[in-house]
Amino acid sequence: MLKSVCGRVALAGLLALALQACADERTDAGETDVTGLTGDGIQTEFAHVESDIPADPRVRFGQFDNGMRYAIMPNATPSGTAALRLVFNVGSLAEAEHQRGLAHFIEHMAFNGTTNVPEGEMIPLLERYGLAFGPDTNAFTGQEVVGYQLDLPSVDLQVIRTGLFLMRETASEMLFNESALDNERGVIRGEARFRDTPIQRFLTAYQAFLYPDTIISERSPIGTLDVIANAPREAFIEYYEDFYVPQRALLVVVGDVDPDEIEAMIRDGFDIEIPGLDVSQVEGFASWQARDDAPAHPDIGVVNPVDEERFGFFHDPEVFTLINIDVMVPGGPRADTSENRLLATRRQLANAIVQRRLQTQINSGLSPLVQANLSYSGDFDLAHRAGLFAVSSPERWREGLGVAEQEIRRALEHGFSQAELDEQLANTRTSVRNAVNAARTRPSTGLSNALWQSWLSRQVFNHPGWSAEWLEANESALTLESVEAAFRQMWGAAPAQVFVALNEPLEGGEADVRAAWQESRNQDVDALDETGSGEFAYTDFGPAGEVVSTTHIEDLDIHQVVFSNGVRLNVKQTDFEDNIIRVRADFGAGDLTPQPTPAAGSILGAVFGGGGLEAHDRDELQRLFAGRSVGYGLGVGADSFFFSNATTPEDFELQMQVLTAFMVAPGWREDGLNQFRSIAEELRRGQNAQAVQVAVNRVSRMLRNGDPRWGFPEAQEIAAFTMDHARAMVAEALSSAPLEVTIVGDISLDEAVAVTARTFGALPRRAESWPEYEAARQIGFPAASERPAEVRFNGQPDSGMANIYWRTTDSFDMRRARALTMMSEVYSLKATERFREREGATYSPIVSGQASSVFPDYGYLWVGLDVDRSEIERMYVIADELAAAMAAGEITEDEMQRARQPILERFSQNLESNGYWIGQIARSQADPERLDWVRTAREQFTEVTSEEVAALAAEFLVPERAFRVSILPRDGDGGE
């Protein structure tokens, strides 16, 4: 439950996000230093109080006499739901040496016993109301924040009161019983194993390099194993009483609520009756008091000025090849004012131009870099930092460092062109415009998170409409000269600090990094030639297609249209997302199509879009579409190829033209393939560093008896793939296969039909049928064996993972598929209670049911347990015990309710989700039964009985249907 996402990073495209999250940085707003604190040194003020930027008028901000703040915002997306957040402006940086890891540990203890909620009762209580543990009930810890979140599926008064009651319990009523602490120590150790990844180790080393005179690198939220194992109860209470105080707290409530009623309950408390709990009255937050000597913000050290370039090096056999260039100056937080937003916008535009230059090189597939990101941030209230973060091909890191250095220097010496600035201004205008257009239907979960994040980062939570007005009023001040000056100010403020991470040892260490940097510095850089953009070449596809039939499916309000060329169209107009239209085009047979070379489908999906169009390569498309809400990229599904994108009403026709152009004129360039090849081994390295990634990317192929359509492609498969293979697999389907287009969102039927007629409807006649590829639908499941199969990964010596895959069946029988889902959910409840709560063996057991709608008689229930390797054999025994208990009928009605209610609540919310609808009605003309999945869901899930679940467990969850895989670290025991 750490705020950090480092442990889950598998794709290079997520690395910049991981870096930002793990460093717990805050984007800077401007120049004027502020404290953001009151006289006691611990309260964070709402930023709008002292700013000329107005807060969103729909938010009710308040503060009690005890210092606690609250923000309440009525919002009806989705209707009848609410999001609660209780956040403290303190995290692991406040820990004393003997408390390292306790900020995060205490976050776990909120679910393990409070004054009025016995240990083990909080999660079941929430599940009965439809909140699933993890998706709806969760918490997070960072270096500067601890937070608790409840996403309520209903705003029924009892549900709202229960949510507020649990937040009030968390604030001051945790018990820290010795037995509960001891039970949770194993869970925390499991999380520490899970998060001990190369990226996390890199980040610790990187923080030590950047902030050498601070404790920042020594205060990772996960802490130390010694403290986790041995910290006494008194250490927990000390931190809890010191820092869980009203002056540090913000309570956020966003949803379909009455602010007056919520404010009164928060302030005054309320009566409550909860079955099974001895509680009748909840005390208000206004009466919550901290002790008089609650400590102020801790002293974490200082960032001193840098007077010469610094270089650092980190080696880990499994780390990505990472290049970091930072320019940092000491300084505290800055006020969020209109003037400072202007300065910040200039910086953002400048960094975006340089990032775009780097992306142009990356798009070719020939650059040593595979990803690059520029940013400007305020770090830990100590410094302001301009940073470039890049991922490089391992063997070309020196060249990659040179590319990054030279592009920064090129911008410093030669500035930018007006065309480059215009492109980024167009993107900025579009982003602001889209935010305004979508403001009314922003989801409550996102708004609640944005509210606490703005408070913590001292940013004004303003309405998007104000941002649009501000941009229009200030755009004349965003001149080329001012943007160039902003770049020179932030990147010329101090000598650079360069840090490189490699998976191979570097004999000279930081001296080699210094030498590579100096070699690049000795090369002259020239101004870039200005590159303009022309006109999009694909706007006319011939005469508009004629409509030959229309059908209205009244119960689901879906319109189905057929054009004279055979193209089918499904349209559902909704008001769930203002000014957003989702488009999907399905054709052909996806991975069922004969594969011209092993893993062709997986590689095709990764490289197709990178080839651009015949008339425009990928880089030119990016320039053409600057400021436009347009996307593209081929999806390869189990039984169809598809394009799927979201756009706006203003750009809807262009989006349809782009997708149609890819049907008739794909570029087939090798740019995307070259780029994929350059990053593939880095991706594989990341996958092999974590057991769960091995399960997803390697074991998935084993579960189909080695079928190469699954799992991450092997190195030899990628090397063998060519764009001729891409053509062989998908070209005929692009030109001829039956085509079904689905449009959902803020659009009228007439507009959807008219634009489709001019684009997809104008294509040549499509085939009326397509091969079923029956042979490709036959896949096997590995036979059960007496001993688990073993797969090795590059984890720590004590890490491992037990995986059980019980073979079940397909989802062709809709009613039975719902019962199998209930079986999976009941097992998940039992697994969490046994493996996590009682055994303390794992951070989070994985229970996932898979039932194929494409491959006959194929499905399985996966139980994955990330544990200490010494516990793997015992985990298999316990997993079998839980299965046997279910088969014997040991399933309570309470378990059935706790499994069923979150499913029903999610379904209700899905009915107000365009993302759900486009997935459900896509291809519904070719396969009308897809609509029955929507029609029957609530009734069928409600019908499933405990006896039915027990019968399925007795049929499927038996040893003779179980394939077991132990994922073990490579070490000296003879493992590969």
Image: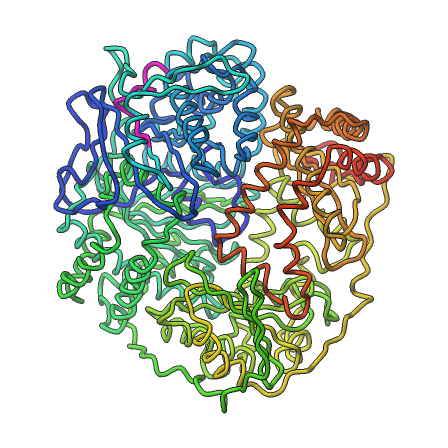
Residue 552 makes an appearance in the image: yes
Q: Examine the rendered structure and indicate whether residue 613 appears above or below residue 386.
A: below
Q: Examine the rendered structure and indicate whether residue 607 appears above or below residue 50.
A: below
Report the front residue among 344 and 576.
576
Residue 673 makes an appearance in the image: no
x and y percentages locating residue 545 in the rendered image: 53, 86
The residue lying furthest to the front in this view is: 554
| 364 left or right of 43 in image | right
Q: For the C terminus, give its image quadrant.
A: top right
Image quarter of residue 93: top left
| 335 left or right of 368 in image | left
Q: For residue 247: magenta?
A: yes
x and y percentages locating residue 4 in the rendered image: 45, 37
Residue at the image point whose x is 24% and y is 53% from the top: 491
Looking at the picture, the colour scheme in use is rainbow
Q: Examine the rendered structure and indicate whether residue 744 appears above or below residue 148.
A: below
Q: Examine the rendered structure and indicate whether residue 568 appears above or below residue 962.
A: below
Q: How many marks?
A: 0
| 25 left or right of 128 in image | left
x and y percentages locating residue 688 in the rendered image: 62, 45
Q: Which residues are magenta?
A: 240-251
The residue lying furthest to the bottom in this view is: 543
Report the front residue among 579 and 411.
579
Image quarter of residue 419: bottom left
Q: For residue 618: magenta?
A: no
x and y percentages locating residue 204 in the rendered image: 43, 35
